Amino acid sequence: MLTAVNAIPASSIPVRGAIALRPTGARPLPRPATLAPLADRARRIALDRDATLFSEGDDASRIYEVTSGIVRLTKTLADGRRQVLDFVDSGRFIGLHEDALHGATAEAVTPVTVICYESAGVARAVAEDAATAQRLLAELLGAAARAESRLVVVGRMTAEERVASFLLARAGDEAADGDVFKLQMGRADIADYLALTVETVSRTLSRFKAQGLVAMTDAHSIELTDVDALRDLASM
Amino acid sequence: MLTAVNAIPASSIPVRGAIALRPTGARPLPRPATLAPLADRARRIALDRDATLFSEGDDASRIYEVTSGIVRLTKTLADGRRQVLDFVDSGRFIGLHEDALHGATAEAVTPVTVICYESAGVARAVAEDAATAQRLLAELLGAAARAESRLVVVGRMTAEERVASFLLARAGDEAADGDVFKLQMGRADIADYLALTVETVSRTLSRFKAQGLVAMTDAHSIELTDVDALRDLASM
DNA sequence: CGACGTTTTGACTTTATTCAAAACGGGTGG
DNA sequence: CCACCCGTTTTGAATAAAGTCAAAACGTCG
């Protein structure tokens, strides 16, 4: 659960410092600024691995800015089938909704820190401050674009194509042969992100290894050994 | 293609009038207002069935508000596999992106009318007018929420569940037994929306008919005969 | 009325899932 | 430090769900 809810004004938080925690090879996310007009009301929260920030159905009275670590957003059907909507890296916001209730569950994939803002304050800030409105507009444009891309991946790609596109997305845009990076999440999270089963993800990675597209020292360390072939599969 | 590009100021357009064209049983979308500060620059455009409003990769210098008819947003992979991202009904906006290029293709499913705004003007309006910023923020919140729901449907539901949830979404929230409505799109569009094949969609609808969940006079007229069973399948 | 595009139905194939079990790895306590 | 334990990952064999290929039925529009 929540391990620390420090009432530290956001203005004193070294937001950029989170970059130090950035895992090798992870995608670059040096977002410049926090929501300035809200800094005084902000609180910082730290989460252990697998802790829940909020759950589907909770009321959405706060939004959060991820400052370090990775958060997974998930939706779960009545019978337990789960879809990971997104892995949210440092610099992005979560909990923005029209509705009064959260439509997804947010959990820490790694240890995570977030800055917490009151939704009411955000609404006011959007109305009063053009820069804040634009910052959130940009955030939402990104979220919408990402969700739409994922719809194509999940809806129309084969297992191999999905895994290839996932690896490339995690490796970052400038991925090159020889790059090594750590997958921060387990096979189950990857499977639910790509709408596959753990077995299919595992088999596909094994096949990639056998074909020389990747090398793996352990299950979480990926070395890209044939980026072109991966890009081909992911069709980029 | 474009059948008419009339230079009519948007202020003279009966935006609410589009409701008259609303197909029986379709979802209610009486969006109140256009983007007021942009009215003078707005142009109205009419599209024939299957006409293209813009294509993936076109530069995104304009955004559009749908005033009647249904637009489909699609993404297509290199080999032709297609995913319908959304069916956009009257009252909603399309073409909002961070990027300079459209990330999807927009085509008319039915005859369509839209109001066209210059993106540059929109950006200015967002900076200057809080109401406009909030209107677009709401639009994007809706788009993001919808895309996330669709990710669950496409990623984790069976063919039967997908078709059931599609029928219910198209029928509207207050759907009741006996309601009849027209599917405005063909089986191919439905299939690409649900990430299935036309054959699977057709077979599933036939099974629903055989099981008494729906009745169909022709391929496009759906009568709901067991909404509870459909809701069960869609798990709502 | 005839032709073409769409929808439906049928038979078979493919892909990913399911169920099952073995291998691996990280952490704990002896 | 090593052995053991538990959760995760990998591998294997069988199954199921949706896809593919093919053709018939339907409807619509000249």
Image: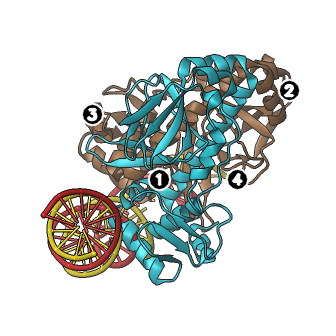
Chain colours: A cyan, B brown, C red, D yellow
Q: Earlier in the sequence, mark 4 or mark 2?
A: 2
Residue A10 position, x and y percent, is 61, 28
Q: In which quarter of the image is residue B83?
A: bottom right
Q: Is mark 2 on a helix, strand or loop?
A: helix
Q: Which amino acid does label 2 sit on?
A: Arg
Q: What element carries label 3?
A: loop
Q: Which of marks 4 and 1 is nearer the N terminus?
A: 4
Q: Which of marks 1 and 2 is nearer the N terminus?
A: 2
Q: Residue B41 carries which label?
A: 2
User: Does the residue at mark 2 contact the one at mark 3 (Cβ under 8 Å)?
Assistant: no
Above or below B165: residue B57: below
Q: Residue B56 carries which label?
A: 4
The C terminus of chain B - image quarter: top left
**Distance between the alpha carbons at the discs numbered 3 and 1:** 22 Å
The number of discs equals 4
Q: What residue type is labelled 4?
A: Glu
Q: Earlier in the sequence, mark 2 or mark 3?
A: 2
Is there one chain holding both mark 4 and mark 1?
Answer: yes
Q: Which class describes the residues within 10 Å of circle 4: few (<14), some (14-19), or many (20+)?
A: some
Q: Nearer the viewer, mark 3 or mark 4?
A: 4
Reading the image, the residue beneath label 1 is B191
The residue closer to the viewer here, A133 or B62, is: A133
Residue B84 position, x and y percent, is 55, 49
Label 4 chain ID: B
